[in-house]
Image: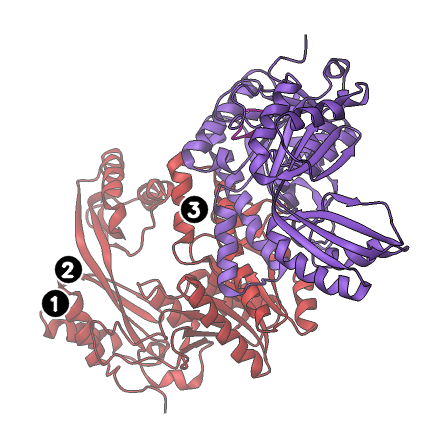
Chain colours: A red, B purple
């Protein structure tokens, strides 16, 4: 098999960890696989570099910030190649530029356009291991760019696709995706497989193990991802396209996110363009609006409620006060102690009654639902933050997630 | 003027020092000069990176070592560009690859072949400041290479030549070249000017301020170097081609090096090829032989005496014991407590009696001369290490070096 392996910051966070990572690489090589290895910066290194820049100015130039932080992965790649060579493995490091990662010119949050991986492939074809810096590339003019936080996952998946690899193994400090947070539900179960869609819904709700962009990319090109621990060599969770075995259960996991805030605009005149009028300024401020609920119109007035990350609550309230005065809304109210709880599952499509079972379970515990939104494979409720643990537990039990869903 | 500035590790060794360096750059810019700035890694950083590699193996792969340590200058270049931009200066960092430094493929000790500086020049022509990583480039295949310790001086001079700069300002932690070590001779005088040839002779004898390669390169292309302090903005020493004013004094400085060892082979059969037989194995071991003296042959036998760095003494003795047994020499003797003292000056060419004055001065102090070698502009004696200070003082006084030699 041709495997792209990706090791995150904690997996290469010290010389000792780099040796351990080399063990894993050597092990897969001994099994006869061909390997390209994507690495992150040593944990803490990216922050150290950014802190240096911030000692100079709170807003460092983004082109130069990219040139600065891109060194972190280069150090790791060289060190891992040195360790592999010491073991007699023909390993060679490749920077983003050398590996052919061509991106657009959006510094600090660049997107990969294509990977000119001929040179890297030639090294693999000659029996070598390629150690590639994650998180970075160069634009058309040769400027160094970075993909933004967590970009190394995307680098790995993109490289796997470009190389037509069989699988992309992402090694991290967790050993897989669980039906819910084991700290809340001790009998939460590790899933052997999960679909891309479910992973996306889980990830956006706080199970932030894989960068969303990397999962979207994998889904688009049908590249399986094996999410696994670099600390313990046991099977993790394979993120792959939906298959038959996944249809058996209605839902596969319960996700939650505590860091939410809710804002309600009451009595806003209901005419075309109000959504743009309300959310345009929020987007301009770089704030991500998540759940949005708009009630039906009464007497030409409507209510809009939405959530934002809690850290953006104050800024959003300030924008809303201004916007709503301009738009003639009656009032703006906010609550920065709410949380989201979701059930996720591709099986939801073919199982009726999932929503009802969810609401019944929450009601049985006396948990008040403040907002509801649904997608094809997810139902999300907004509840008071103090009810999160209770809600997760009752839902995990109600959908019998402690039982294996396959076989 | 178009100026290439070079700042060494101590000049960029902290955020505070980077700010100070930005002051110097901004000052020259305010004077209307166009600037390319070559930077070293922050002091200690290169050693930190090498130590990481050595934690993995005593002999890290040289290609990967280059990829590793090249990050040091990239960090500095980005940080300085960030600080300059903060001040409203259109500064941009360039890695060795981006600045077009093409080298051969000799990792860890690459040589610059040419600089494709069109892109950098375009930035300068647009009124910008280019901040360039010293010490590094890429080979024809795009592999990252480094020039070896002190290579940033060579980068700066090579860039000055490629850009047809007016001068190359090398900022360091000393404020110029003195007639001798002021710690030994308190009235040693800073030289306003020194010829390339003299600088080379001074540098190879311990006044290790400028990398020898950079001086040779500057000499070949007649690029003046202004060696100056980044801590105190006073004129330093300009290294330039020999001019009339330099001819006035017989010698311009006294140099010394304590870390020498002397080895004598006695009674070796004198026939063609003995030098190769003796020195070949030493060169193979990577040891630099410095002064070599061969006495005239008597009865078909000759004596050879040479010096090596003291740190190579034991290894060289071991080689000599073996070699001399094979070549039928009578004996091998060593002394690892010798030192070299030299007088240097282009004026020596037109002034007779320099050697005599030197030997007289040493004799007056009762200092025994163990070896003598001469070049066009230098006379070197090997003496017992305990006499070094005394020898330097008496020579500095004998040649009246405390008096300004120009005007």
Image point 33% across, 86% down: which residue?
A405
Residue B175 lies in the magenta stretch: yes
- Number of the label disc, if any, that sits on residue A384: 2
Label 3 environment density (alpha carbons within 10 Å; few <14, some 14–19, many ≥20): some
Q: Upstream in the sequence, badge 3 or badge 2?
A: 3
Do the residues at discs 2 and 1 belong to one chain?
A: yes
Give yes or no for residue B89 being in the magenta stretch.
Answer: no
Disc 2, disc 1: CB below 8 Å? yes
Identify residue for label 1. A367
Q: Residue at x 64, y 31 (%)?
A: B255
The answer to whether residue B34 is seen in the rendering is no
Region of the chain picked out in magenta, as a range: B170-176
Circle 1 marks a residue in which chain? A
Residue B168 spot, x, y in % from top left = 65, 27
Among all residues in the image, which is located at the extreme bottom? A407
User: In this rendering, which labeled residue sits more in front, label 1 or label 3?
Assistant: 3
Residue B60 lies in quadrant:
bottom right
* Image location (x, y in percent) of residue A349: 35, 77
Quadrant occupied by the C terminus of chain B: top right
Residue A49 is tagged as 3
Identify the subunit bearing mark 2.
A
Q: Closer to the camera, B327 or B152?
A: B327
Q: Are marks 3 and 2 on the same chain?
A: yes
Give coordinates of residue B91: x percent, y percent. 55, 31
Q: Nearer the viewer, residue A386 or A281?
A: A386
């Amino acid at each position: 098999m041709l495997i792209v392996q990706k090791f995150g910051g904690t997996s290469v966070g010290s010389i000792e960890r780099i040796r351990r990572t080399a063990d894993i690489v050597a092990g897969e090589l001994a099994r006869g696989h061909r390997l390209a290895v994507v690495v992150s910066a040593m944990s803490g290194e990216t922050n150290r570099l950014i802190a240096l820049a911030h000692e100079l100015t709170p807003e460092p130039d983004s082109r130069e910030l990219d040139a600065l932080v891109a060194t972190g992965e280069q150090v790791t790649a060289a060190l891992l190649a040195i360790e592999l060579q010491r073991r007699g493995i023909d390993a060679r490091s490749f920077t983003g530029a050398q590996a052919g990662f061509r991106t657009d010119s959006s510094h600090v949050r660049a997107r990969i356009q294509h990977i000119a991986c001929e040179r890297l492939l030639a090294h693999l074809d000659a029996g070598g291991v390629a150690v590639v810096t994650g998180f970075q590339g160069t634009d058309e003019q040769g400027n160094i760019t970075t993909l933004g936080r967590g970009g190394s996952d995307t680098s790995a998946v993109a490289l796997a696709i470009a190389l037509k690899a069989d699988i992309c193994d992402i090694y991290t400090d967790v050993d897989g995706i669980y039906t819910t947070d084991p700290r809340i539900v001790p009998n939460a179960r590790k899933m052997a497989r999960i679909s891309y869609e479910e992973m996306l819904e889980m990830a956006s709700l706080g199970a932030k193990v894989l960068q969303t962009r990397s999962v979207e990319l994998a889904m688009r090109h049908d590249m399986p991802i094996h999410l696994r621990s670099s600390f313990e060599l046991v099977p993790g969770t394979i993120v792959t396209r939906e298959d038959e075995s996944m249809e058996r259960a209605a839902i596969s996991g319960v996700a939650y996110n505590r860091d939410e805030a809710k804002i309600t605009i009451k009595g806003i005149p209901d005419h075309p363009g109000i959504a743009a009028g309300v959310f345009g300024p929020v987007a301009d401020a770089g704030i991500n609006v998540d759940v949005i609920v708009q009630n039906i119109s009464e007497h030409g007035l409507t209510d809009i409620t939405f959530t934002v990350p809690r850290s953006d609550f104050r800024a959003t309230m300030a924008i809303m006060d201004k916007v709503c005065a301009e738009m003639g809304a009656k009032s703006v109210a906010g609550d920065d102690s709410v949380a989201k709880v979701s059930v996720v599952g591709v099986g939801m499509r073919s199982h009726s009654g999932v929503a009802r079972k969810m609401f019944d379970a929450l009601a049985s515990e006396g948990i008040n639902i403040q907002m509801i939104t649904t997608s094809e494979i997810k139902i999300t409720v907004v509840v008071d933050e103090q009810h999160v643990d209770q809600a997760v537990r009752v839902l995990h039990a109600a959908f019998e997630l402690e039982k294996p869903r396959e076989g």
